[in-house]
Image (spheres, helix red, strand yellow):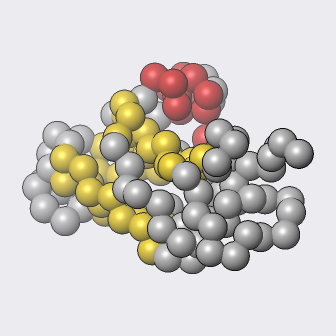
Amino acid sequence: PQDIYPPVPVSDLAGGSSAEGQLVLQWTAPDESQGVAPKPNVPVVSYQVRVASFSVDDLGGDTTAWFAAAEAVAPAAPGLPGSEQTLLTTLLPGVTYYAALRSVDDASNPSEFDALLDQPAYVKSLEAGQ
């Protein structure tokens, strides 16, 4: 049967800066399938990471349009569920960036965006180190 269940969404995306112009994103690797019994030790196949200097509110709250317009960042290789994932990317110093992340399983099903319950649009505002 065809896999119709997306990965569990990442729920703990965090960001910061380690040096001038560098942005560090961290999260916990999710389970490969949501809505079914977890597959022990089966990682997602890939991550889709986007960053932009404009917010989703600048696009009328349309997260799909934001994700399509934002710059793709080469993601980290997925680890086993529960492991810490880290991505380091170089951006312009002193600019506020917004970041979003979703994972993709072996059937190309994408997860929802990182769920931030206290912020609409599921996009985090992060400032690259100065």
Q: Is residue 68 left or right of residue 85?
A: right
Q: Is residue 13 above or below residue 67?
A: below
The quadrant of the image that shows the C terminus is bottom left
Q: Is residue 21 left or right of residue 70?
A: left
* Residue drawn at 26 percent across, 57 percent down: 88
* Residue drawn at 46 percent across, 23 percent down: 69
Q: Residue furthest front?
A: 1
The quadrant of the image that shows the N terminus is top right
Q: Is residue 114 left or right of residue 35?
A: left
Identify which residue, 99 or 10, lies in the foreground: 10
* Location of residue 20 (image quadrant): bottom left
Callout count: 0
Q: Is residue 79 above or below residue 54?
A: below
* Residue drawn at 67 percent across, 60 percent down: 32
* Location of residue 10 (image quadrant): bottom right
Residue 119 in view of the camera: no
Residue 71 in view of the camera: yes
**In x, y percent, where is residue 86?**
36, 65
**In x, y percent, where is residue 115?**
64, 55
**In x, y percent, where is residue 121?**
61, 41
Identify which residue, 77 or 87, lies in the foreground: 77
Q: Is residue 6 above or below residue 42?
A: above
